[in-house]
Image (cartoon, rainbow, N blue to C red):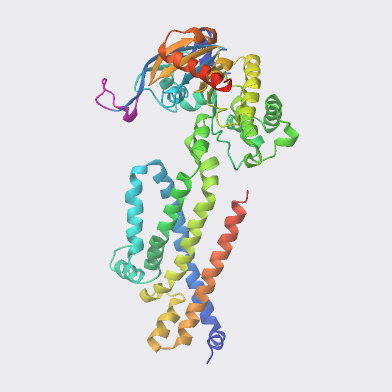
Amino acid sequence: MNVFDFMIRNRAEVLQLTLEHLTLVAIAMTLAVVIGVPLGVALTRRRALERWVLGAANVIQTVPSLALFGFLIPVPLIGGIGGRTAVVALTLYALLPIIRNTYVGITGVDPAVIEAARGMGMTDGQLLWQVEIPLSLGVILAGIRVATVICVGVATIAAAIGAGGLGMYIFRGVAMVNNQVILAGAIPAAVLAVLADVSLGWAERRLTAR
Amino acid sequence: MDGVVEPAAKAGSVIECRGVWYRLDGGGHDGSSQGRALLSDVNLQVERGETLVLLGRSGSGKTTTLKLINRLLEPTAGEVLVEGRRTSDWDPIRLRRRIGYVIQEVGLFPHFTVERNVGLVPSLEGWEMPRIRARVAELLRLVGLEPGQFASRRPHELSGGQRQRVGVARALAADPPILLMDEPFGALDPVTRAELQREFRELAARLGKTIVFVTHDVREALLLGTRIALLAEGRLVAIHSPGEFLRAPETEVKAFVSALGIGELELNP
């Protein structure tokens, strides 16, 4: 049986798992942006913290994803079996590229522009919203885009801790030694990743058009 | 417009440095134990309407002095007074909006049009849009740029000289009584530089602003300054009018004046 026959026959389930997958990614990415961008901005104001925060985010990034999901299971409140744990793990993974790009983007703004802005009497808030964020938007969005693509991929592992998503097919296929079933999870996941990349790339170009 | 400023306006100097020290790392103690001193015991006064040129070699403390005036830096010891008030007593935002600031790299906002760049301080001050528009057009004409042609351009569509003209217009936007200029013409080609220097001299005379102008170029200092203050290694060596400067006895001044002569000697073998 062909993969596509399998997917068409099980289209309700494929759609269901794809939606679960998207939901996990959407929630995790929203959290990661809400936490990561302000944290990246905060680092530009307290540069002494940069080493610590980026260090911590780096360490998280080096933990193998399957292990990270496993580590979170026994943690109270955020851990356990299911979607919540998966969202926490995905958020942690998405943080590094977002924090780092926000920090790098803002510290990369031409110092002469910042000096002129300060010299003209812009407040910290005006400097951030009218100068620093607009001028680093491209770099920040690139970080969000990378994080989203990583997140779509890593979310396949969420199935291992009972959070559903397209990983269900992949794990099931591995257990059944059935490539068709593996592909029925892998192909939609890859398509999602490409779509996320293309659409965020488009948004990036639109928003940073000179 | 800002009631607080009125009493100071009667007093003589607009800007005054009293025993100003500036040290890196802000080490508060005296002596050479901690933090290199970028400025050592600088005393000077800038009178209303004059153009004081701060002349000196790289690292002599010119830019540091300028940044102490608009409180981008604060003195380690001593005090800087603007319109009779210590800069530390000014709200830094209010202080800076009363002081136009032009730097060598210009620092135009690349994501804003020329019009928004020039209109920035007025818009921060909450002016109405039509008033900002009119003011921007007036300023662009003042610095020799046709508003219809330039207002909607982005900084990257301008030449170096045009960019610096926009920088000057931006600094003048909210009609500040004081103008600080940090080697504004230093990055321009010699022909454009000479052109802008000439125009700026006329502009300064016409507008009656109090100007502090930093340069390492003696010719520029002699051309633009009503007085020239020479800084060397963080110390104020002398303040002279351009006429006195050429005949002044101080060694450091002579070094600058003779540099002027050497240039001409090499031209005429």
Q: Point out residue B194 in the picture as x, y percentages from the top left corner.
A: 63, 24
Asked whether A159 or A151 is in front, the reply is A151
**Visible residue check, residue A38:** no
Q: In which quarter of the image is residue A169?
A: bottom left
Asked whether A82 or A169 is in front, the reply is A169
Vertical arrangement, residue A73 with respect to residue B212, above or below:
below
Vertical arrangement, residue A175 with respect to residue B118, above or below:
below
Asked whether B53 or B142 is in front, the reply is B53
**Visible residue check, residue A170:** yes
Whether residue B29 is in magenta: the answer is: yes
User: Residue at horizontal 64%, vertical 16%?
Assistant: B207
User: Residue at horizontal 43%, vertical 73%?
Assistant: A156
Q: Point out residue B51 in the picture as x, y percentages from the top left corner.
A: 55, 15
User: Residue at horizontal 44%, vertical 55%?
Assistant: A98
Q: Point out residue B165 in the picture as x, y percentages from the top left corner.
A: 64, 29
Q: In which quarter of the image is residue B196?
A: top right
On screen, residue B202 versus residue A194, left or right, reads right
Residue farthest front in this picture = B269
The majority secondary structure of the magenta stretch comes to loop
Residue farthest right in this picture = B148
Magenta-highlighted residues: B23-34
Q: Point out residue A166 in the picture as x, y percentages from the top left corner.
A: 47, 76
